[in-house]
Each structure stands twice: as C-alpha cells, then as structure tokens.
Amino acid sequence: MIENNKKAILITGGAGFIGSNLCEYFLSKNYKVVCLDNFATGHRHNLKDFMNNENFSLIEGDIRNAEACKQAVQGIDYVLHQAALGSVPRSINDPVTTNDVNVSGFLNMLVAARDANVKRFVYAASSSTYGDSVGLPKVEDVIGKPLSPYAITKYVNELYAEIFSRTYGLETIGLRYFNVFGRKQDPNGAYAAVIPKFVMQLMQQESPRINGDGNYSRDFTYIDNVIQMNELAMTTENPEAVNTVYNTAYGDRNTLNDLIGYLKTFLAEYDPKIAEVAIEYGPNRAGDIPHSLASIDKAKTMLGYNPKYSLQEGLKEAVGWYWENLRR
C-alpha cells in the first residue's frame, strides 16, 4: 500500500538501462517507486542496489498483459513508461513482436493509467519518428515517413497518447529520445547499443566495426540529461507544457568517427594500448538515417530544460563506469 505523504511513480521497463537509472534517481528524491518489468531485455543486477529500499517495489510482469498493467498502476501518481522492444534491426527481423510490445503494450498501459486516474503519463518516444525527414535540426512538429517497423510503433504511441489526452483527459508527455548512452547500458546481445558495444571491444583490444564510412552523425545524449527531462516532464505545473512531445537530446551532433576517437582517447587513459586499436568499416545498416540532430528549443522554453552533459562530458563519466563494471 502506498503512503499518502509520498508521491508514487510507476516505471515500466524499470530494470532496463534508462528505467533503472530513473528508479535510482527518484528513490534518491524520496519518491515511492514501483518497477514493472518482464526481464526480456532488462536485468536484475540493474536493481540490486535498491531491492531492499523500503520505497521500492518490483512487479514482475509484461505490459502485454492488461491485468499486470492494472495491478501496477494501483496507487500510482505518475507513470514513466520506458518498457519497449528497442532496436531498428530487431523490428525489421521481427515486426510482429515489436508491434505487440510497443503498440499493444503501450495501449494497455494507457488504459490502465486512465482507469486508475494517474495524474500524468510520461513515455519514451523516439527520434526514429522523424523517419525520412531530411531537415536539420529536427523540430517536433515536422516529421517524415517512418523507415522501420520500430519507428512506426513509436509514432503510433504518440498518436494514441494524443487521443487519450483529448478524449479522456489523461495528461501525457512524450520524450523523443536521441541516442541515449551511459551507465548500466547493456553491451551484450545482437542488438546492443553502439557505445557500450564499442567500449567492450576496445577494452579487449578488438577492432570495432562501424556501419558505413563513419560519417553518419548522431545527437548522442547522456543518461543524466534524460533523467532531467523525465523529472521536468513529470513535475511541470505549466498546463501549456503537457499533452505534447519533446526532443530529448543535447542539441549537437557527432559522427561515429568522432565517437570512436573520443572513446579511444578516454579509454587509453586506463590502457594506453587501446589508442592503437584499428577500426573496421562495413556496409550501412538497413533502416538507419544518415544524420540526426535535435532542436531542444521547445524543451528549454516549455520545461526549462538545460542539459548538463555534452557527448564528451558524458563519455568521460560513462567510460569510468564501463571500466569498473564491464571489464572481463
């Protein structure tokens, strides 16, 4: 039972990379935190530091199960919905499961939140929604056609959220994440994110393989910037700031070649041999967009967003964590 004097947050996908960082942060702020996760991609070790925290509770369940969603939202003030099957390649290989989790599961959570009179539903949207739009920087109200099943699912999330805001009065805010990285990000598996995967390879003095010539660019976004955006979206009292979507990024872009260069430099401080590791290049990956850069003006204006970590600053922090936790 949730105490009335503490606000309660449900974090779906709370055992994942972003979700577990959100759990840790909001527990430090003395919120009650409920984590809903089926451990399909999340990990129990991401939760170990706060499993015994009296303000934390874990529900092992799947957002594709409406009853699990209904149970999870009982007594909840805010939902931070992070649960999803990420990865463009995964969605190309298995569009049905991606749709089941990201669309049907999302709809289950919206219905549960509506029925439980949750105050606000903040959800992980995606920069993939911009699709084939070529303009830079990306501005929230100008999108193109999706380039993958994953991108379609994340756009459908935005459409459903808007309908639930208009039709049922549920406050929603979507955060279009741009290439998030940082501590607790999983380097393993077929669909591992590029930064921890490269770090693991470099630490083992193996040559990372870049898709394409390395000149594709991304707005890499450190986890602490993402935490800040979730907190601002959850707590804003500006009625004009809700029922919309925001880019969640740093507002700068770096090429994959830039990224590898920074990683080699920072990791070489721990092991000088890493500076000499060669880089391999392969074909471009299906569904990838060439360049990504966010305008964060809307988030700055409406929410007071002020990202603290550039790519280099975030990598310096992350590399130290990777070195301590990911070495084999």
Image: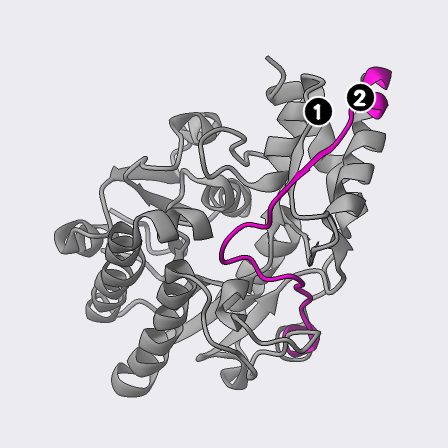
User: How far across and how far down the image is residue 181, in percent?
Assistant: 62, 44
Q: Is residue 233 left or right of residue 52?
A: right
Q: Is residue 8 visible?
A: yes
Quadrant, the C terminus: top right
- Name the element at disc 2: helix
Residue on which the image places disc 1:
202
Task: Say which residue appears at 49% left-offset and 65% top-offset.
Answer: 234
N-term mark: 2 or 1: 1
Mark identifier at residue 274: 2
Quadrant for residue 109, please give it.
bottom left
Magenta-tinted stretch? 272-300
Residue lying furthest top: 328
Task: Locate residue 295, reporting x and y percent.
Answer: 69, 73
Taking the spot 68% from the left edge, 21% from the top edge, the residue there is: 206
Q: Secondary structure at mark 1?
A: helix
Which numbered tag is attached to residue 55? none
The verdict on residue 184 being magenta is no
Residue 86 or residue 308, whichever sits in front = 86
